[in-house]
């Protein structure tokens, strides 16, 4: 399979991506650099080139089963140079959100993700917010009903992203989005989304880089959360044919600015990266 691009739009994107003083990349993790425990070839080389050429970037992920330290270690295990401070995940945004409001929460997340909320007040009786992450096989009807009762008692629901599913070694698995949608249906209360596809999540990462969205590019495998969300934030987008990509995605209302087979094709697709003198 060969990479396909949309020339009239990609040519403009490539010019901007070639100059680190004018633009930056945001990268999804799962489905772009790896599928569960399996690395996707080319990711380590792309990031090494980004660093060597001085091109600014951040990793933006809806993963809620791991905190930033664990995510950085996972990338490093695949040979990808990464620092926890370069990773933006929903738990970081949610922690900042609760601190700003001086609000209490109850956390339906993994222990690893819960560490991102250190210092945030937990209230198991009448929390201000219920923070919903991916518990995977640890979800039980007892926990689902406890979330429901908190919400019916007046707590607000915070969803750590709205990803529909992710691709594990044994096949697709449900993510936070369908579970948050179920609670929204049960209570009539829309969730507060602190993760992709909320445009504020992309803008948070770009503010950290001091880069304008129009001069930035999102690389992801999810046509809705990655591509649609980034476009709503004013970014250019590149869809990879790895991870959860399906041919039907190309028939969706959302149209990426470029399509490539995998992260390994990124540098060739966008032209040679170069630093400004």
Image: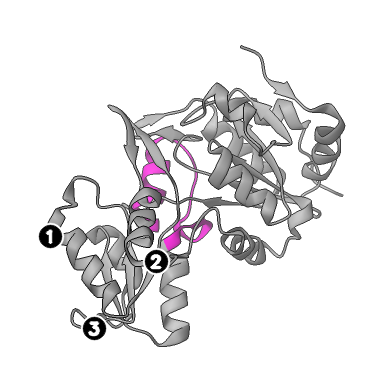
Q: Which range is magenta?
A: 67-90
The mark that comes first in sequence, 2 or 1, is 1
Q: Position of residue 122 (x, y in %)?
A: 25, 80
Residue 188 sits above or below residue 223 on the image: below
Residue 3 sits above or below residue 78 on the image: above
Element at badge 1?
Answer: helix
Q: Position of residue 92 (x, y in %)?
A: 44, 66
- Residue at 81%, 54% (x, y): give it: 22
Q: Position of residue 264 (x, y in %)?
A: 59, 26
Residue tagged by mark 2? 188
Depth check: give the residue in front, 109 or 216.
109
Element at badge 2?
Answer: loop
- Residue at 41%, 60% (x, y): give it: 160
Check residue 245 for magenta coloring: no
Q: Residues within 10 Å of mark 1 (few under 14, many from 20)?
A: few
Residue tagged by mark 3? 126
Residue tagged by mark 1? 142
The mark that comes first in sequence, 3 or 2, is 3
Marks counted in the figure total 3
Q: In the image, 59: left or right of 274?
A: left
Check residue 86 for magenta coloring: yes
Q: How much space separates mark 2 and mark 1, taking CA atoms?
A: 21 Å
Residue 110 sits above or below residue 75 on the image: below
Foreground disc of the pair 3, 2: 2
């Amino acid at each position: 399979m060969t990479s396909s691009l949309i020339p009239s739009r990609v040519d403009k994107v490539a010019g901007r991506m070639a100059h680190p003083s004018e633009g930056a990349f945001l990268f999804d993790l799962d489905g772009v650099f790896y599928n569960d425990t399996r690395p996707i070839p080319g990711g380590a080389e792309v990031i090494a080139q980004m660093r060597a050429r001085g091109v600014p970037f951040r990793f933006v992920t809806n993963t809620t089963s791991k905190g930033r330290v664990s995510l950085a270690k996972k990338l490093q295990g695949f040979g990808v140079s990464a620092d926890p401070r370069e990773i933006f995940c929903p738990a970081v945004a949610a922690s900042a959100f609760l601190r700003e409001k001086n609000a209490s929460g109850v956390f339906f997340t993994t222990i690893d993700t819960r560490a991102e909320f250190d210092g945030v007040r937990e209230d198991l009786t009448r929390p201000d917010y219920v923070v919903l992450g991916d518990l995977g096989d640890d979800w039980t009807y007892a926990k689902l009903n406890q979330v429901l009762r908190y919400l019916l008692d007046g707590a607000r629901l915070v969803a750590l992203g709205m990803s529909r599913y992710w691709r594990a070694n044994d096949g697709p698995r449900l993510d936070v989005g369908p579970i948050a949608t179920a609670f929204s249906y049960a209570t009539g209360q829309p969730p507060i989304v602190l993760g992709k596809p909320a445009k504020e999540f992309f803008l948070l990462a770009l503010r950290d880089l001091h880069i304008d969205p129009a001069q930035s590019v999102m690389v992801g495998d999810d046509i809705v959360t990655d591509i649609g969300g980034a476009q709503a934030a004013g970014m250019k987008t590149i869809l990879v044919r790895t991870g959860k990509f399906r041919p039907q995605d190309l028939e969706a209302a959302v149209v990426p600015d470029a399509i490539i087979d995998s992260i390994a094709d990124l540098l060739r697709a966008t032209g040679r990266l170069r630093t400004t003198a």
